[in-house]
Image (cartoon, rainbow, N blue to C red):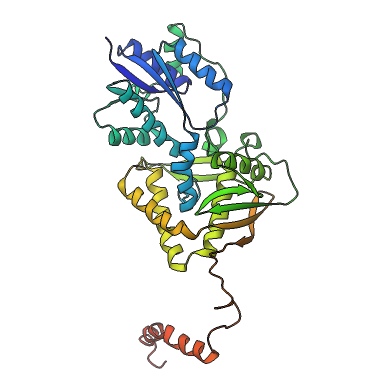
Amino acid sequence: MAEKVVLAFSGGLDTSFCTVYLREEKNFDVITATIDTGGLSNEELEYIENRSRELGAVKHYFVDAKREIFDEIISYIIKANALYQGVYPLMCSDRYVIGKHIVEIAKKENAKAVAHGCTGAGNDQVRIDVTVNSLAPDLKIFAPTRELGMRREQEIEYLERRGFKVKSETKKYTINENIFGRTISGSEIDENKAPNEEAWVLTKITKREPESVKINFEKGVPTAVNGKQMYGVDLLHKLNQIAGAHGYGRGLYIEDETFGIKGYQAFEAPGLLLLIEAHRSLENLVLTHHQLNLKNQLGNVYADLSFRGLFYEPVMRDIEKFIDSTQEVVSGEVTMRLQEMSVMQESVTSPYSLINEKIARYAQAAGWKGSEAEAFIKIYGLQQRIAWSRKKPDI
């Protein structure tokens, strides 16, 4: 009996090639696994399952992981305000869930190996390989496209020689779509130019008039839009529609890759970016200066490790515990104003607000006298005064 391999399968060219190669050249019984992280229609899912069967896979698994991704990943991206390099909302993080599920399927099937269709140039190979090596170090990992250095033309020729048709559509851009939104590369983007308007789908501008949207949070997690209770995935989809109609949520930046090079990347994530901005506004109302300062630092560390393939590094769970402790008071309502590809905070309310007019009110002393403020200022700046006097002794 042939050994089994579980292949993360999208039905595209690379994973189609991997299915046939692993079956014919490596003599594996190939089990394909499609982990739905968002962005796939029912028609696409049906095509993927039929494609798996056509290519000779012995079994096909489908896992709907959208809710899992929101609970375990997106909710923490929101709570941490985690943006890689201050820009990118970690839309690549679904790879960790893909890696985890192919490991679980491999254990269920008593398979000794897993496989994926990543090339040797991208970041996704790091995220999946490190995940598998961490969760199941005994599993072998096969990545035929990477190992053989196959070009697209060579993969097409390999499949067609064996009687497998390949879709002839030519794509201007390389697109990855999931629950987070869409990432876009290729064509003029690789030439350090802004994408043509045709590249944008989620942020196609259809509204010119300003629009306000109310978002409710409970312990840092969004729970309602404009007064309607909604769960994470549906709420994110709703905000994609609302914010995207104003063209908000586009990004174009130079990305520091895991392999030490830099690359151009475009993305659109209107709902997620709006949630992060609204969440940050609420935190500014309810968290202390020192909480915000430390949390911002840890949020940057969290984003960097998540981007670079180390989602299962133990310190990530430590950071999440700290973040959760700060979110105990991050509940309230935020009103954001959308207009012409931008967003602005309109109002923020919370029962945990640190603005308490009974104790102190901005621009009006309350609870202390003017003479007490004057004395505080003299003491507060004393060390700076002494340090400056070393340069100018006459002061």
Using the image as rendered, state which of residue 385 and residue 293 is in the foreground.
Answer: 293
Quadrant for the C terminus, please: bottom left
> Residue 214: percent from the left, percent from the top?
65, 52
Decide if residue 160 is in sight here: yes
> Residue 273: percent from the left, percent from the top?
56, 48
Decide if residue 123 is in sight here: no
Q: Residue at x 38, y 30 (%)?
A: 101
Using the image as rendered, state which of residue 258 and residue 189 is in the foreground.
Answer: 258
> Residue 291: percent from the left, percent from the top?
43, 64
In this picture, is 169 found above or below 296? above
In this picture, is 121 found above or below 161? below
Q: Residue at x 74, y 47 (%)?
A: 208
For this view, does 391 lie left or right of residue 80? left
Quadrant for the N terminus, please: top left
> Residue 213: percent from the left, percent from the top?
67, 51
Q: Residue at x 54, y 51 (%)?
A: 276
Snapshot quadrant of residue 122: top left
Q: Residue at x 56, y 73 (%)?
A: 356
For this orientation, the residue located farthest to the left is 138
In this picture, is 99 found above or below 360? above
For this orientation, the residue located farthest to the right is 209
